[in-house]
Image (cartoon, rainbow, N blue to C red):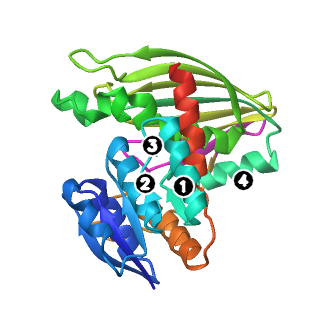
Amino acid sequence: MLNIGIVGSGFGSVGLLPAFKSVKGCKVVSVCTNRSQWPALLERADLDAVAIAVPPQAQYRIAKAAIKKGLHVFAEKPLTATSAQARELCVLARKKNITHGIDFIFPEIAEWKKVKSLLDSKKFGKLIHVSVQWKWQSRDSRLKKWSWRTKIKEGGGALSFYFSHGLYYLEHFAGKIIDAEVLFLYAKGNPYDGESGFDLNLKFKKGITGSICLSSDSRGQARHTLVFTCECGVIVLENKGAVVDNFIVKTYSAAGEKRVRVPKDKQLKKEDERVKIVRILAKRFVRACMRRQQMVPSFAEGLRIQELIDRIRA
């Protein structure tokens, strides 16, 4: 049995807690919703691991303290506010030989797995270009209550807070990113330095190109669309009005348009839509901890994405 503690009042309570509570072989022994009380949680003698969902600067401090105690750590994205912090955690985790994971959730969604299999099988030939349109209105923008999510030094800004997911899933689909050119966009009224969106052009090691348009200040919109242009066809992965739900897969080729049917991920009643996907990673993390192995995605992937973020911002 793996005894785990949860740190975080937002997604920690609505996402991590129900996900880990439902994993066999795992027992949630403590939940810390007051960020100032986490040192006491780490002192518990029965604790084997912690799952954290707090802002990046705080996560860095909590994860560092947990690793020093030999505890396994499951972290929120982005892993830290800087690549130097992420690198420090990776070195310390390797030294203490602990298991670590991070919740890059999108590649775990059933429809995303289907698209990955279509690309890997080269059903429509080699991938040439991938484009992303991700538009919605964030809580900060909607309520005009600006938070750490719009402060770059705190790990905020749309590139860091939201598109850490995107950089991970783009490398998952298209391989290593080798070059980037960005134009940042800013929400009216935001007193801090974090961008609300951006236009980003990418080059991948395999010769693939990418174009991304992200806006967290798009009133009346809630859409996430990925278009994969291949040698002999196009694959579209898209949803509306949700984070991980409602994705559909369509293909376009000489044979015409086709809707690809994919069995949906199972969701329990009255739980946040993200929980069913986090549960997949939670199971993987618990299994890896029990076997004293590493999992993917881990802090290594978190460091890679933070390095990309820092490079794009430079």
- Say what amino acid the circle numbered 3 marks: Pro
Q: Residue at x 38, y 35 (%)?
A: 155
Q: Mark 1 or 2 closer to N-term?
A: 2
- Residue designated by label 1: 92
Q: Please give the label number shown on residue 64.
A: 2
- Can residue 137 be seen by looking at this rendering? no
From the viewer's perspective, is 173 left or right of 245?
A: right
- Residue designated by label 3: 78
- Can residue 117 be seen by looking at this rendering? yes
Q: Position of residue 268 (x, y in %)?
A: 36, 71
Secondary structure of residue under mark 3: loop
Q: In the rendered structure, which segment of residues is drawn in magenta?
A: 238-258
- Say what amino acid the circle numbered 1 marks: Leu
Q: Mark 3 or 2 closer to N-term?
A: 2
Q: CA distance from mark 4 to mark 1?
A: 35 Å
285 vs 198: above or below: below
Q: Residue at x 54, y 55 (%)?
A: 92
- Say what amino acid the circle numbered 2 marks: Lys
Q: Please give the label number shown on residue 117.
A: 4
